[in-house]
Amino acid sequence: MSYHKVSDSLFPFLFLMEIIKAKKSKIKKTKLIFKNLKRKVLQKYNSFKFPEIQEEKELLEYSAVDLGWELEKAGSKDTAEFDNFYLDGSCILKIKKLSDAEKYLMSVFLKSIEDIPSENLEAELETQFVEFCNLKNIILENDQQKYLLEIIRKELFSFGPLSYLLDSKDIEEIAINGYGKDKKICVYVINKGWHDSNLYFTNENYLRELVNKMSRNIGRRITLSSPILNASLKDGSRLNAIIKPVVNSGISITIRKFRFNPLTPLDLIKNNTISLDLAIFLALAMQSEINVLIAGNTGSGKTTLLNSLFSFVPLDERIIITEETPEINIPHNHRVCLKVNAEQKINMTDLIKTTLRMRPDRVIVGEIRTKEEVDAYLDTILAGQGKGSYATFHGLSVNETISRLKNLGLTEQDLNALDLIILQKRWTSIKDGKKIERRKLFEIAEVENSKVNILFKYNALKNEFEQVNESKKVKEKIELVFGKKYSVLAKELRDYLEFLLADKELKIDEFSKMFNSYILSE
């Protein structure tokens, strides 16, 4: 093949001209570096043919690519820094905003590996990516290759950019309300409230596939014939997804994050969710044989409180847990977790009845909603299940909780089977022009002779917990177990809990072991 030779003195000038042209046409507006640009100059000016040039031209002259998601350009990052994001008015993910060329490179690479078995791909991904770039004569800077590979891994083996939010220990809830630039993902940051993120999805098909990927482990899919999906992720997080025709505003996805390290009673005291007096009373009550119903509004922390209270329960007891979606996370090894299975038509009532044959020391019912579930929960209590039965229930006050239970068939006689009703409440308060979301234990009531006796109540004006009445029924049960006066037990336990509060941070299993060792040593 013949070609006209370019003089050595002219080549640098021509090489520079090509770079300027590339920049002016925005072809080279990213860090993507094509190592054979020199060859392109030779090809253009010397008619020298290289077989790979057409492929490179395809990469250089990329078109816009929709990966299914996008990041809005982040602002300043001079405020609070978290594990996977910055909080600067909004939740700014620590991900590089990809250029069009980088998105194009990702898309063609992902397409090139579609036929590689997934079991081989994870171990070989970096090798495959490097070889692909070499084949296309692309050189990436080290940090660029690193973050592109990380994003590709999330796309292939996790849940795309959503993984960064799911992996964050500081985010409690994730809400997706459709797709588009004006539909940014909202997150609930613990102790900080709701914030928009700088992440949004760009098409509904990607979102649907993401939902189906998240629910794959339980074999469910969201479709037009099944437009509502409730599932749990492998880590226990709770997923709810809804599409048309059930929702008009576009696909809606809500993810309630699973807490790997549940809050201890010490944590609840420190953040003023409960007081030391409340903790002492509940600790001694949980060591006794009582039945407890925890009521509250949505997102108030009912399950969080239940998990925390079970760190007071002896670790050698057999606990049976029944749930629709796994959320209970207690430190006991001798526990059996039963889960509703809609496909097999096994409901909560079936599970609660099954516990009657499993010789539990205690039974936890994740949540009771229907008349049948309330009846089944009461059956476990009236059958004398071990040392107590526990459940959560929706209610805005103790009196409203009882009213709702009665509407679901609870009789005056059945009411006596309950020992304590604990109300957990979530509300928004405004202080110094700022909205603050509060979650607190709001009331504790004792049930005796079909009457409700309010023992403790939160005073919002004073921001403190007040004792309203003395306990009789529960204190008698406590004194029966310990063989000591309640006042003596409370004083001793106060000293111990104050000692723990001044000590280092404890995880729930560590706290539970220390607390139960203390109880047995008394």
Image (cartoon, helix red, strand yellow):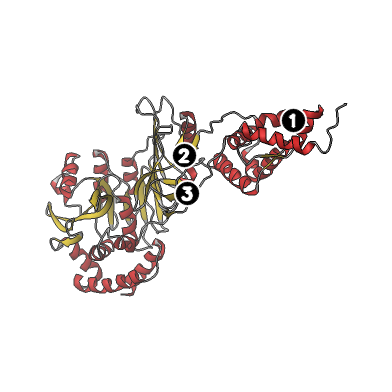
Quadrant the C terminus occupies:
bottom left
Is residue 123 something one can see in this rendering? Answer: yes
Residue at 70 percent across and 32 percent down: it is 56
Is residue 313 something one can see in this rendering? Answer: no
Give residue 331's position: percent from left, percent from top: 40, 59
Q: Determine whether the residue tagged by mark 2 lies in a helix, strand or loop.
A: loop
Q: Are marks 3 and 1 in contact (CB under 8 Å)?
A: no
Amino acid type at mark 3: Asp
Residue at 72 percent across and 28 percent down: it is 54
Quadrant the N terminus occupies:
top right
Q: Are marks 3 and 2 in contact (CB under 8 Å)?
A: no
Measured in 3D between alpha carbons, the distance from the residue under mark 2 to the one under mark 1, in whole angstroms, is 34 Å
Give residue 146's position: percent from left, percent from top: 61, 47
Among numbered discs 3 and 1, the one appearing first in the sequence: 1
Q: Determine whether the residue tagged by mark 3 lies in a helix, strand or loop.
A: loop
Amino acid type at mark 1: Ile
| Few, some or many residues within 10 Å of mark 2 (<14, 14–19, 20+) | some
Measured in 3D between alpha carbons, the distance from the residue under mark 3 to the one under mark 2, in whole angstroms, is 20 Å
Q: Which residue is mark 2?
A: 72
Among numbered discs 2 and 1, the one appearing first in the sequence: 1
Left or right: residue 191 compared with residue 217? left
Q: Which residue is mark 3?
A: 167
Considering depth in this image, is 491 or 189 the residue closer to the camera? 189
Compared to residue 111, the image places residue 271 above or below, namely below
Residue 411: assigned label: none
Residue 53: assigned label: 1
Considering depth in this image, is 415 or 197 the residue closer to the camera? 197
